[in-house]
Amino acid sequence: MGDRLFKPQDAHKLESPERQVWLPVADVIRALAIRPGMHIADVGAGTGYFAIPMAQAVAPNGKVYAIDLQLEMLNMLREKLERPDAPPNIELVRGHASKTMLASKCADVVLIANVWHELDDHEAALQEAARILVPGGTLALLDWRPDKKSPPRPPSDHRLSASDVVQFLTKHNWTTSPLVNIGHYSYFISARPPHSAESISA
């Protein structure tokens, strides 16, 4: 990931009120078709921008696995979860897109938000998503549009176009739904893995 990895010292940007304007969580939850009782893996959960409202949406019997590689991010989210009004159905997991540390077939949805462009090994991440998804489950990729000028991070040369991402998924026999643009700067792609036992064809 190198210099593409989000820095913990910039975590205040994730909490900015302006972010709710240019990346409305409600729109993402709607696109995910989240329902009570679902289990969701939030890969790259950061400080819980999506994890907390998703946990509220799947309550009381659903669960969110908040996965992040950086302990600093998980600790920030842990502090939030100690508040009296925090949802009790979030499990913090130290892991990353290609090794989530989750059990197989445990998630109805795998959300990878603003992380896909950071990854060095998209094939490994795709294989891991296929492993942890339940049959009929959905992978959702939310990432930055390269055709839009936006807040400082990430630079345009780090971004991946939606068409390239769809092409990658299709190449590996995933079935994609129509592309949706969300907020001011993001695209949203949902996909389902192939029925074959092999998630990735080289």
Image: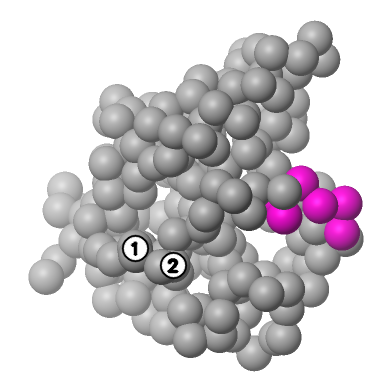
Residue sitting at the far left: 202
Residue carrying label 1? 1
Q: Please name the amino acid that badge 2 sits on.
A: Arg
Residue 17 counted in the magenta span: yes
Q: Nearer the viewer, residue 198 or 153?
A: 153
Q: Please name the amino acid that badge 1 sits on.
A: Met
**Helix, strand or loop for disc 1:** loop
Q: Nearer the viewer, residue 200 or 121?
A: 121
Q: Nearer the viewer, residue 138 or 161?
A: 161
Residue 68 seen in this snapshot: yes
Q: Is residue 191 above or below residue 86?
A: below
Provide the major secondary structure of the magenta segment: helix
Residue 14 counted in the magenta span: yes
Q: Is residue 190 above or below residue 36?
A: below
Contact, CB < 8 Å: mark 1 with mark 2? yes
Question: Bounds of the magenta span?
Answer: 13-18
Residue at image point 34% right, 76% down: 168
Q: Nearer the viewer, residue 182 or 157?
A: 157
Residue sitting at the far front: 9
Residue 129 seen in this snapshot: no
Residue 186, horizontal then vertical, whole percent: 67, 70
* Image quadrant in which the C terminus is located: bottom left
Determine which quarter of the picture holds residue 145.
bottom right
Left or right? Give the position of 129 relative to 191: left
Left or right? Give the position of 91 relative to 84: left
Residue carrying label 2? 4
